[in-house]
Amino acid sequence: MPKVLVSDPIDPVGIELLGQVAQVDVQTDLTPEQLIQVIPNYDALMIRSGTKVTPEVIEAGKLLKIIGRAGVGVDNVDIPSATRKGIVVVNSPEGNTIAAAEHALTMMLALSRHVPKANVSLKAGKWERKKFTGVEVYKKTLGIVGLGKIGSHVAKVARAMGMQLLAYDPFLSQERAEQLGCKLVELDFLFSEADYITLHIPKTPETYHLINAETLAKMKSTARIVNCARGGIIDEAALAKAIDEGQIAGAALDVFENEPLGESPLSAVEGDLILTPHLGASTEEAQTNVAVDVAEQIRDVLLGLPARSAVNIPGLRPEVLEKLQPYMLLAETLGNLVGQLAGGRIESLDIRLQGELANNESDPIVIAALKGLLSPALQERVNYVNAGIEAKERGIRVIETRDAAARDYAGSIHLEAKGPLETRSVTGALLGDNEIRITDIDDFPVNVAPANHMLITLHRDMPGIIGQIGSQLGGFNVNIASMQVGRKMVRGDAVMVLSLDDLPPEGVVAEINKTEGIRDSYIVTLQ
Ligand SMILES: NC(=O)C1=CN([C@@H]2O[C@H](COP(=O)(O)OP(=O)(O)OC[C@H]3O[C@@H](n4cnc5c(N)ncnc54)[C@H](O)[C@@H]3O)[C@@H](O)[C@H]2O)C=CC1
Ligand SMILES: O=C(O)C(=O)COP(=O)(O)O
């Protein structure tokens, strides 16, 4: 049974689900050193934001196949290291959207009405009504930085509360922003116009310290900032100073540059500052959603099935995946075949998607073809996760073309691998029941199903040659299961494809290549 380590608190429903297919160990208080010590025993790791999956953890995880992040942000996982090692990283992109959006809205309202301070004051026996006079959000301007899933939900609710909405998101269309009732503006304009600023962006090199002394200086003295996205987007020392000096009216933060917070300039702020310990996703509903979402994906990957929300391989909606999966298998088989025919170094791979495939998502097919192409060299070390990187590192240029007019089959794939000396090509299609057919080798038409062991010859079409090869294989005690010849003209060049019951012993190719009329021959192993 595979083993899964759960190293952050996860809803029991996810652990039960995984327990059906794996041994699940829950250890939520491991130090980084302890994690490195135990990780070599595990096939999968399930985490939230608490566990730091460093390059050292990934290096030590010799059996690791999948890291499941029960939440959105994967900035605590070293994705490049995981990708290089072929470890799939999955998350739950939508499971906690509502929870995080509602927390940001809660923070905005709590800040406006001094809820935390009023609560403390009342519990201390005071009745300070005047001191805690607040402000309304109605008709105020809310600037949303990052109008993705969480930012969009915040926009919908804020609009219903009568707020004017500005948004900054360089990757979003004007049309989508307008649908949400937001005016898409430049960041400086948002900073200077907004009464409230709420951040819903990932932490990236571009967003690190986006809110700093300089940008804080552009804001209104009545501005209030909410950060339920990621620590590090705000320069905490600059924010503490801006609040204390009255440069802005206040802030509410759920996330911090270092978590747990520990010693921080934020703790000493006297002005309006609300802090929560990364609670954005902490609702019962969100925790059930993310635990089930990620546990299902870990289960699927451990059972050899694809994951629906992988962050380091092309993600596919289930309905698209259902249609593309047989073609991915076809692409992988053809990649494997053309890789074996090309033999040595490959400089470029031309991938032509034909017929109905021309109008489909192509990334998964390209990745599958590369996995097949590299598998003769890398064996099980190449997978859907690292095939793209491995190809790039080997300097293989990938060229993708589409030909919707090719109609011999509903959909077919043509691969052409160019090496320094020669170019080899194969084409394949799917029959009605998704059975794979190789329909072309080096432009010679054939119609063969891939077999475990095959002998492919390039030869001159002449009497007696087929018989000779049959006898030679017989001499090596190799049984032929089927045979096909493809040629463009009688007595011209031809290709012969033999499916064999047994792996031919060494020496067969050398022997066959001595036969008059044979230009070259290859033993190919597929499936
Ligand atoms: N506090 C908490 O517990 C939680 C925090 N989060 C965090 O909230 C953030 C947003 O999550 P989602 O809305 O689900 O992500 P999303 O991917 O749906 O949206 C992010 C948006 O930010 C935009 N963006 C990226 N770089 C940008 C930049 N430099 N400037 C402006 N916009 C930029 C993207 O175009 C996208 O529209 C993430 O950082 C996530 O980790 C998510 C859930 C819970
Ligand atoms: O999903 C996210 O990005 C979050 O920040 C939630 O983090 P958590 O799972 O509560 O540790």
Image (cartoon, helix red, strand yellow):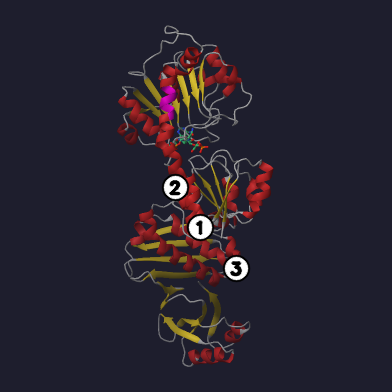
Q: Is residue 6 above or below residue 278?
A: below
Residue 284 vs residue 149, the one in the foreground: 284
Residue 379 position (above or below residue 97): below
The disc labelled 1 sits on which kind of residue? Val
Residue kind at label 3, given as amino acid type:
Gly
- Residue linked to disc 3: 344
Residue for badge 2: 293
CA separation, marks 3 and 2? 42 Å
Q: Horizontal and vertical percent for residue 217?
A: 51, 17
Viewer-nearest of labels 3 and 2? 2
Amino acid type, residue under disc 2 in the picture:
Asp
Residue 380: x, y in percent? 58, 63
State which region is magenta. Answer: 103-108
| In-front residue for pair 520/482 | 482
Main SS, magenta residues: helix
Give the residue at x 40% y 26%: 105
